[in-house]
Amino acid sequence: MSEPSKAAVAAATAFVAAHGKSARAVVENIGRAGVRVVLVGDDGALGDVIVPDVATGEALVAKVEGLDGKEWDRETIAATKIGPEHRRKMAGPRARG
């Protein structure tokens, strides 16, 4: 396993602390850019951390207290709460007008 950077650990730890003291983490390969560790807080908030590879993503999940490795299953999807601000951000600049 690769060791996650201090910045990645700090970001994931801060997310967990801010969104309910535990969070789901889905490790997704995004191609050349690396791997996205999608975080879903107990309150439904979404966040992410980008790491170089799957092994580093899995090591991040193992290292951060309160993170629970998951897949995009029914419970994880149902736990997400995407608000209007996040929807605008995902829509891109053309949607913002």
Image: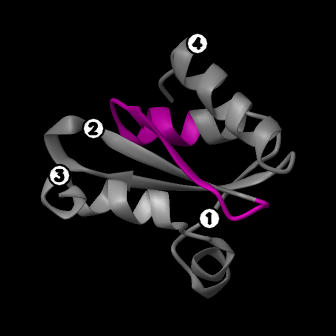
Helix, strand or loop at disc 4? helix
Residue corresponding to mark 3: 93
Residue 89 image position (x, y, % from top left): 34, 54
| Residue matched to label 4 | 6
Q: Quarter holding the C terminus?
A: bottom left
Q: What stretch is highlighted in magenta?
A: 42-59
Query: What is the CA distance from the residue labelled 3 to the residue labelled 1?
Result: 31 Å
Foreground residue among 92 and 23: 92
Determine which of the numbered discs, if any, sits on residue 34 in the image. Answer: 2
Could you tell which of marks 1 and 4 lies nearer the N-terminus? 4
Task: Classify mark 3: residues with Cα within 10 Å, few (<14), some (14-19) or many (20+).
Answer: few
Residue 3 against residue 77 in the figure, above or below: above
Which quadrant would residue 82 be assigned to in this image? Answer: bottom right
Secondary structure of the residue carrying tag 2 is loop
First of labels 3, 2 by sequence position: 2
Q: What residue is rendered at 25% in x and 50% in y?
A: 30
SS under mark 3: helix
Q: What amino acid type should be assigned to the residue bearing mark 2? A: Gly
Residue, x 68% and y 38% (percent of image)? Answer: 15
Residue lying at 48% horizontally and 66% vertically, measured from the top left: 84
- Mark 4: give few (<14), some (14-19) or many (20+) Cα within 10 Å: few
Mark 3 or mark 4, earlier in chain: 4
Spatial distance from mark 2 to mark 4, Cα to Cα? 17 Å
Residue 74, percent from left and from top: 60, 87
Give the label, 3 or 2, closer to the camera: 3
